[in-house]
Amino acid sequence: MPEIQLGAHTVKTHGVKVARVHMHDWLILLLLVVIEGVLNLIEPFHRFVGEDMLTDLSFPLKANTVPFWAVPIIAIILPFFIILAYYFWRRDVYDLHHALLGLLYSVLLTGVLTDAIKDAVGRPRPDFFWRCFPDGVKVINNVTMGVICHGDAQVIKEGYKSFPSGHTSWSFAGLGFLAWYLSGKIRAFDRRGHVAKLCIILLPLLLAALVAISRVDDYWHHWQDVFAAGLLGLVISSLCYLQFFPPPHDPEGWGPFAYFQMLADSSQNDESSSNTNNCLGVTNCLGVRTTEMETVYMHSDDGEAGIGLRESNPMLDSMEAGRRR
């Protein structure tokens, strides 16, 4: 294993170099932000809602226990501060960069998938009745027996975005990545049986689960919505984490792949430089392969024997044999 050089790679000394290597990843990240914005602007599919379906869609229209603005704080800001705190402790820009990149990819990929599915499915929320008929007077089409909404257009638009839950998927994406990150840093799976470490990595998942439960309690989502969203967030966060870090049970699970690759490259460069500066003999320095040199016994005319080196090239051997004849 390469020598650990923690504290030698900071944002000031290596930050630009590391970011430049992953410039295309940051550009794709910006593209995901644009796609996420577009998905929130387009109109979702308006699934048919019949009069007989309103029984399951007439729950009260309540405010959010966890407001929309709090989701980025829970899913991005909170994990980022923990990652940043680890950086100030160890001064490893490789860990900071790859953890931040993995976190953002985890949340944004989950967000894009969530909103794309929302717009495609168009499932009504449990409180759809009060979104469609804010005055409580329902209007039904006599032919199709479908509802004819007369509420606020923006409120009705949100009423068709039940599946899957955005609050839940974002929370499990960001906090799920944090759980992976913490498990690697505290070596939760080092086979020493410290159950207290499991409590630490389960705390972020508990917070995400509470956010998911609040969505059902507020009647903004069905239970299937939050279950699928939680699963989606966990899968994406796991893939993003394992893209940058070894599994937590790995002996090198505490650091990113790029850090160990950098150490291996540095060790190889140092070894190559050392071999170049320490040539054994002029012949080797001039480029003759060592496999073509072999040890021979040399006999002088006075009967004394000695040990020397001679070239073992077949062509030279033939020339030497011809000369002796």
Image (tube, helix red, strand yellow):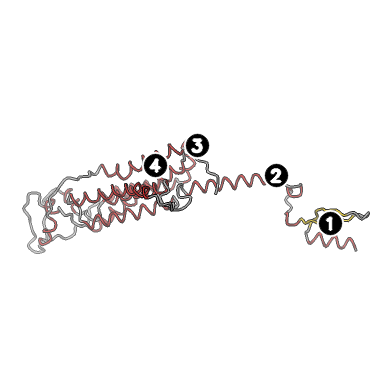
Mark seen at residue 83: 4
- Report the side of 301 relative to 224 (left or right): right
Identify the element where label 2 is drawn: loop
Which residue position is annotated with label 3? 13
Vertically, is 307 above or below 3? below
Amino acid type of disc 1? Tyr
> Residue 299 location in percent, x, y?
88, 56
CB of mark 4 within 8 Å of CB of mark 2? no
Q: Earlier in the sequence, mark 3 or mark 4?
A: 3
Q: Earlier in the sequence, mark 1 or mark 2?
A: 2
As drawn, the residue found furthest toward the right would be 302
CB of mark 3 within 8 Å of CB of mark 2? no
Which residue position is annotated with label 1? 297
Amino acid type of disc 2? Asn
Mark seen at residue 278: 2
CB of mark 3 within 8 Å of CB of mark 4? no
Amino acid type of disc 3? Thr
Q: Nearer the viewer, mark 1 or mark 3?
A: 1
- The quadrant in which residue 49 appears is bottom left
Q: Residue at x 54, y 49 (%)?
A: 1
Quadrant of the image containing the C terminus = bottom right
- Report the side of 282 relative to 302 (left or right): left
Identify the element where label 3 is drawn: helix
Q: Earlier in the sequence, mark 1 or mark 3?
A: 3
- Report the side of 127 relative to 305 (left or right): left
Q: Residue at x 31, y 47 (%)?
A: 203
Amino acid type of disc 4? Ile
Mark 3 surroundings: few (<14), some (14-19) or many (≥20) residues within 10 A:
few
